[in-house]
Amino acid sequence: MKRTLTLLFLLLLFGGIIEAQTRFQAIPEGFDQNGGNIPAGKIDTILYQSTTVGTVRKALVYTPPGYSADKKYPVLYLLHGIGGDEKEWLNGSPQYILNRLYADGKAKPMIIIMPNGRAMVDDRATGNIFAQDKVEAFARFELDLLNDLIPYIEAHYPVASSRESRAIAGLSMGGGQSLNFGLGNPEKFAWVGAFSAAPNTRMPEELLKKQEDVNHFTQLIWFSCGDQDGLVNISNRTHEYLKQQGIEHTYIIDEGGHDFKFWKSSLYHFVQLLF
């Protein structure tokens, strides 16, 4: 796998690339706050036609400071949890985190897509969010993502279309989706991240059906979980299997629970390793 010097350095700080079970590096105070006078990106709502669902669906798009249609940008698809929708990540201040990282020269400018990962006609997070049809809709989103959303983004935004320029990450249910879709489609995603992956994460043997392709194509497999998170066993089993198979990955266990305090820290560290 190709690694830039920066990527190698940061991974070494985390303690290695195959068995990294260490804590996050220190985060600057105010990393998730409005940066005042620093250049700011922009968040817009888009509507795209979903042939998978048979309706028009919403997503949020973050474009970085200095965004220009004359440039080509890499893309991060950032997924929410079982109780959220396309707006849930706004609770994690991704625009402020990225603005600050750009101002500090610590991340490559990218476009971030925050979709609704519940691929069904009524995709609101209402009623019984654990109902079977809603859980199935999270799995169906793989088709919506690959066949509808990604083509829309590539037709309407100046994004690079290679897998090396495409990342996927998410929290909780979205973390499980990211591992499922990212490792399941290594020809589509070169960068995969999961924060507090939920039980929708496929069993490790199922995640790596394309193991040779994962080894060949994937630039980064990165996942994290809080040590007080009740779902930490999901991340542990994935880590242990990847380690047994000799699959390069970074696994961070740090103090925290199943909440945005931890997910913001995860996003802050993950995006610095991308592209």
Image (cartoon, rainbow, N blue to C red):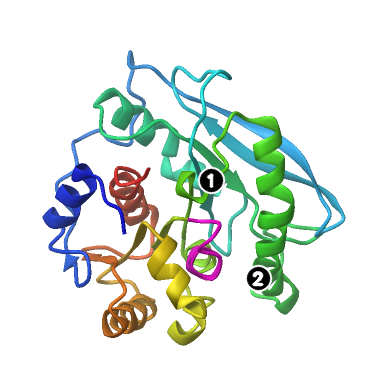
The answer to whether residue 5 is left or right of residue 94 is: left
The amino acid type, in three-letter code, at marker 2 is Ala
Q: Is residue 113 above or below residue 222?
A: above
**Residue highlighted by disc 1:** 162
List x then y, in percent, for residue 221: 36, 63
Image quadrant in which the N terminus is located? bottom left
Give me the C-alpha separation between circle 1 and circle 2.
Answer: 24 Å
Task: Identify the residue at horizontal 31%, vertical 77% (top origin).
Answer: 239
The answer to whether residue 251 is left or right of residue 185 is: left
Q: Are marks 1 and 2 in contact (CB under 8 Å)?
A: no
Which quadrant of the view contains residue 17?
bottom left
Image quadrant in which the C terminus is located? top left
Task: Identify the residue at horizontal 33%, vertical 50% (top origin).
Answer: 270
Asked if residue 255 can be seen in this view, the reply is yes
Please check the rendered image and state whether residue 110 is part of the magenta-colored stretch, yes or no.
Answer: no
Instruction: From the viewer's side, name the closer residue of 256 and 73.
Output: 73
How packed is label 2: few (under 14 Cα within 10 Å), some, or many (20 or more)?
some
Nearest to N terminus: mark 1 or mark 2: 2
Mark 1 secondary-structure assignment: loop
Q: Which mark is residue 139?
A: 2
List x then y, in percent, for residue 251: 26, 67
